[in-house]
Amino acid sequence: MQLSAERIEWRDEFKVGDPETDSDHRQLLIMLNELSAGVSQGLGHQMCRWVLDFLLAHSDGHFRREEDAMLAARCDSYEKHKAAHACFLQAVTDLRSRAERTDVSREAAEFLHGWATNHTLREDMALAQIGCRR
């Protein structure tokens, strides 16, 4: 069962200038790629809960660091970005809850691919370019 999402390999141009944030973003891509491969191999359900648990355990601290940096830099898009983080956490929480009852691995992989593509690799990088990360 192939996913419509393409594999995203980490590249130096994805860096936002903060080593801890860059490490978190790289880890997200690794986990997304592993989950997508698992789905394609019929092992997604086994991996999905672990990936979602990891994201729930680590995303709050990551988002807090990003938001603190945005506040310090007085970024105009702080509230919008913070709301996007809250929506991500709610979506991952919902997926994790449903993963107890059914296989949501394909949905989770596609959601995470969209997040990585649209938020991490576009919005976060754009904010870094205008000085909202340092």
Image (spheres, grey):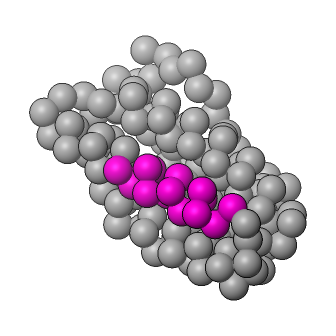
- Kindly tell me whether residue 88 is visible in this rendering: yes
- Kindly tell me whether residue 10 is visible in this rendering: no
Q: Looking at the rendering, in which quadrant would you find the N terminus?
A: top left
Q: Is residue 126 left or right of residue 82?
A: right
Q: Position of residue 21 (x, y in %)?
A: 64, 70
**Residue at image coords 66%, 40%:** 117
Q: Is residue 51 left or right of residue 101?
A: right
Q: Position of residue 57 (x, y in %)?
A: 35, 66
**Residue at image coords 48%, 35%:** 111
State whether the magenta stretch is mostly helix, strand or loop.
Answer: helix
Q: Position of residue 19 (x, y in %)?
A: 70, 76
Q: Looking at the rendering, in which quadrant would you find the C terminus?
A: bottom right
Q: Quadrant of residue 131?
A: bottom right
Q: Position of residue 96 (x, y in %)?
A: 26, 45
Near-viewer residue (79 or 31) = 79
Region of the chain picked out in magenta, as a range: 77-90
Q: Is residue 125 left or right of residue 2?
A: right
Which residue is most to the left? 101
94 up-or-down from 83: above or below? above
**Residue at image coords 69%, 61%:** 77
Near-viewer residue (9 or 133) = 133
Q: Is residue 71 left or right of residue 93?
A: right
Near-viewer residue (131 or 96) = 131
